[in-house]
Amino acid sequence: MDEPLSPNTRAKGSGRLAPLALILSGGGLLMAVAAAAGTGSGSFSFKIGLLLLVLGFLASAVGGLIAIIALVLGRRRDEPNSRMPLIALAIALVFGGYFIAQLSTAMSVPPIHDVATNLADVPQFTTLPVRADNLANIPSGGDAALAAMPPAARWQAIHRKAYGDLTTLHLPLDTAKAMDRATRLVQSRGWVIAKLDAATGTIEATDTSLFFRFKDDVIVRIRPDLSPAGGAIVDMRSISRVGESDIGVNAKRIRAFLADMNRG
């Protein structure tokens, strides 16, 4: 006949797992914070930062699994409830939810980082430099037709398919009023303006992400609408300075800005 477990033996069950779970889940979260801080400060490259983020997620996920085991063992052995595995599990769930959401978004958008409203007449930066490898790594995704295209044509083909909703905005305003509206919107967003030229209707500015401090360069171009409708036409372009995929942030930025321009 098996002897019942003593209180001390029971305490060694989940009691040893709970601290380990918290160390892993909390440590994983701290690793992610360090990755963001190091990348944002320029202490190391964004690739190292993303690697640390992935490692942090894996550590936190393992911590969450261990926390679940600790909770199950504790319930089976009638051990007193402990907050430690609950905290570890909560950290793992929150961090894991964020990471998986970002990964899901990345998989749902094309791996490009240069987005514009007018592919036939792409707005050109004159003050902010465009990254040297901007169109150097446009993927074909195994499509033979895309692979046969030059990089610029491949980028346009992928762009048209993914972001066909991004088009030139027509406003019933003269260019001066449209320029004033665009300037106020840029300033309200906290973008750092590098060029503001009312004569050419051009604004160049940089937006910095909150977490990893990634920098994306934006150009807003306003011209008179020469059609019978008159008014102004607004085009935009947004480019990420690093990385191959922007996880859809450039298109999202353009949509939001043009929607605000249209609302006034």
Image (spheres, helix red, strand yellow):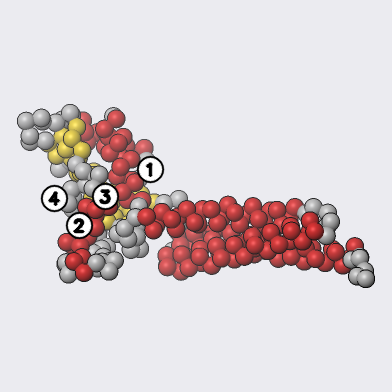
Q: Position of residue 45 (x, y in %)?
A: 42, 67
Earlier in the chain: of badge 3 and badge 4, it is 4
Q: Quadrant of residue 29?
A: bottom right
User: Residue at horizontal 33%, vertical 40%?
Assistant: 256
Amino acid on which disc 1 is placed: Gly
Q: Name the quadrant containing residue 221.
A: top left
For the residues bearing labels 2 and 1, Cβ distance under 8 angstroms: no
Of marks 4 and 2, which one's residue comes earlier in the chain?
4
Q: Is residue 173 left or right of residue 78?
A: left
Mark 3 or 1, nearer chain start = 3
Q: CA distance from mark 3 to mark 1?
A: 25 Å
Q: Given the image, on which type of amino acid does mark 3 rest?
A: Tyr
List the residue tagged with mark 2: 156
Q: Position of residue 121 (x, y in %)?
A: 13, 50
Q: Is residue 154 visible?
A: yes
Where disc 1 sits, the SS reads loop
The residue that mark 1 highlights is 190
Of labels 2 and 1, earlier in sequence is 2
Confirm or deny contact between disc 1 and disc 4 (CB under 8 A): no
| Lower position in the chain sequence, tag 1 or tag 4 | 4
Q: Which residue is identified by label 3? A: 163
Can you give x and y, in whole percent of width and height, for residue 20 in the image?
71, 65
Q: Nearer the viewer, residue 16 or 242?
A: 16
247 in relation to 185, above or below: below
Residue of label 4: 121
Quadrant where the C terminus lies?
Answer: top left
Residue positioned 49% across, 59% down in the render:
36
Q: Which mark is residue 177?
A: none
